[in-house]
Image: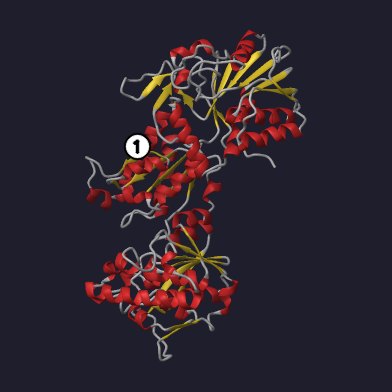
Amino acid sequence: MKLVFASDSFKGSLSSRMTSDLLTKAAREVFGACECIGVPIADGGEGTVDAVIDALKGEKVIATVHDPLMNRIQVSYGIAGERAVIEMAAASGLTLVPEALRDPLNTTTYGTGELILDALGRGCRELYIAIGGSATNDGGMGCLRALGARFLDKDGNDLSGCGKDLAEVSTIDLAHLDSRLSDASVTVLCDVKNPLCGENGATYTFAKQKGATPDTLELLEKGMQNYRDIIIKQFGIDCDQIEGAGAAGGLGAALKVFLNVAMQSGIETVLDLIGFNDLLNGADLVVTGEGRADSQSVCGKVMQGVALCAKARGIPVYGLCGSLGDGAELLYDCGVTSLYALVDENTSVEEAMTNAEQVYYHAAVRMLSQIKKGETMKTLNCISVENMRESDRMTIEKYVSGRTLMYRAAMGVFRAVNWHGEIVIAVGGGNNGGDGYALACILKRNNYTCRIVKLSEKLTDDSGFFAKWAESLGVPCEAYESGAFADADVIVDCLLGTGFQGTLRKPWLSAVQEINSSNAEVVSVDINSGMNGDTGEAETAVQSDITVTIGYVKRGLVSPNAARYMKKLVVADIGIVLAKEEEKLVPADADIQPDDGCIPAPNYLMMEPIDVSREELPN
């Protein structure tokens, strides 16, 4: 068994690494011998340097820079090979400014620029800059000044690069920008989408929390508008049209316009840096968490990022958090299976903070014990046709191509059947026909004798791709005529899908009747053609020896009506992400209560799916 642990830090009590270590200890108590992969993680905010450097086996280095008020301080950032990971808050963060002195008219990002210079001086050419938590609203002028840029007023005088200088900028001179930047790749970790100016811009959204008064806000906004207009005049770029330009008091704008950086989601970048997708290979479950899960947890935070990665791979995710607030349930849509909290009726916030390690460890043992208990009883999702359609659409839109899913469906059918003799694949139009054409390609590539009998010329783009591939492989294809299945040893039913309702008409009715009267072994793909996917009702439907349903069990397949049409039902897991939980199918002899949301599975349903969720379309 392989478990992957990736939790954010619990501020003030547990580091990200500590949660992984405690989960590993708990897992070995509950599961015995198991493989545990613990990885520190952060979302591009506080803790990003520690997480990435830990994962990449890098080191922290010390640099002397200027804080937001231009006092000299020593700060650290991370280096791993030619990579540098910098948190701008280390040099230009709000926590560095005493509350009584907080005024974004007077603060600067100069120290962040100095950190970039220090990294360049140490040979780093791949820079990652997390730009959250700033004390500044200087449009990034301070940072660029440290890197060699000049910001001049109307008389040609150099400006220092703090917030009050925004209104005075008349010319921007990049002639002396550090030449090493041209050889560097700079990525900004930023989940803020705000433009530079306006009611949703840098000033009106963030400057108040940095100490700006109503009068100050007006001055800063007018200054930022002047800065924006100068950039438009000199560089032809409107920062109000750039997502994230308003991040960190406009630092996002400066880095994007003057350095042409890539701006990426913080959590997605961190996951990529630490190779999280590779860590998921072969994983049975993932545990993530943070100090408090609430509606903000789905706004580019750790739990959301980890869950979406695991969800795309079909791996269950469990959340262990300090506490659960309003909106925590939104994480279920991201792929979290269950949420657990340290704080409950038996444990106060104070106790959880004071005895954090002990409380977290015992909560981890309870959670993993419940997971273990649940895994002793196999379950399968049972869903409506509409839910299946939405799940399919969402998966294609966000995670994997429709063509790859079609190939996986065919591969699931291929693995479910003992193929022999003359194989005839009956195909209709749309995706069901596409599954048949893809199956013909797989059979032919594995040296089986097969041919295609088609009842429709209407094909989707993906179906057409596999039809052409089958033709190039030399698979015979003919239009349906009476007697088309006479010599078949195996007939594959890819005629109609789960959306069919009503009465079969010729030539579909004739084909189904001919299939049913044959002596061949019959395989139905996804659903027996002619059957209603939600009710299992049918006036006439294909009678199969085995039905291989794709993705999830449809309600109609396990209804009393369906039993007379199939002898065996198998699920092919092709990696479709479920849009909405409905009912769970459990073994017929399972001890369940009426309100458990579970229904007993029919005896013909195999409870162990065929997993083809990681198959990729061959070149």
Please name the residue that numbered disc 1 is placed on: 366
Judged from the image, the secondary structure of the residue bearing numbered disc 1 is helix
Q: Is residue 337 above or below residue 413?
A: below
Count the numbered circles shown.
Answer: 1
Is residue 331 visible from the viewing direction of this image?
Answer: yes
- Expressed as whole percent of the image width and height from the top left, the position of residue 160 reads 39, 84
- Expressed as whole percent of the image width and height from the top left, the position of residue 439 reads 66, 28
Rendered image quadrant of residue 41: bottom left
Residue at the location (36% across, 79% down)?
166
Q: Mark 1: few, some, or many residues within 10 Å (few <14, many ≥20)? A: some
Q: Is 608 on the left or on the right of 349, as rendered? A: right
Residue at the location (55% across, 39% down)?
282
Q: Is residue 229 above or below residue 509?
A: below
- Expressed as whole percent of the image width and height from the top left, the position of residue 410 reads 62, 29
Indicate the quadrant containing the C terminus: top left, top right, bottom left or bottom right: top right
Along the viewing direction, whichever of 601 and 177 lies nearer the viewer: 177
Is residue 20 visible from the viewing direction of this image?
Answer: no
- Expressed as whole percent of the image width and height from the top left, the position of residue 491 reads 66, 17
Q: Is 511 on the left or on the right of 231, as rendered? A: right
Residue at the location (51% across, 10% down)?
564
Colouring scheme, one of rainbow, by chain, secondary structure, one colour: secondary structure
Q: Most extreme residue toward the right, as rendered?
A: 474
Rendered image quadrant of residue 612: top right
Q: Amino acid at mark 1?
A: Arg
Q: Most extreme residue toward the front, as rendered?
A: 506
Along the viewing direction, whichever of 440 and 108 lies nearer the viewer: 440
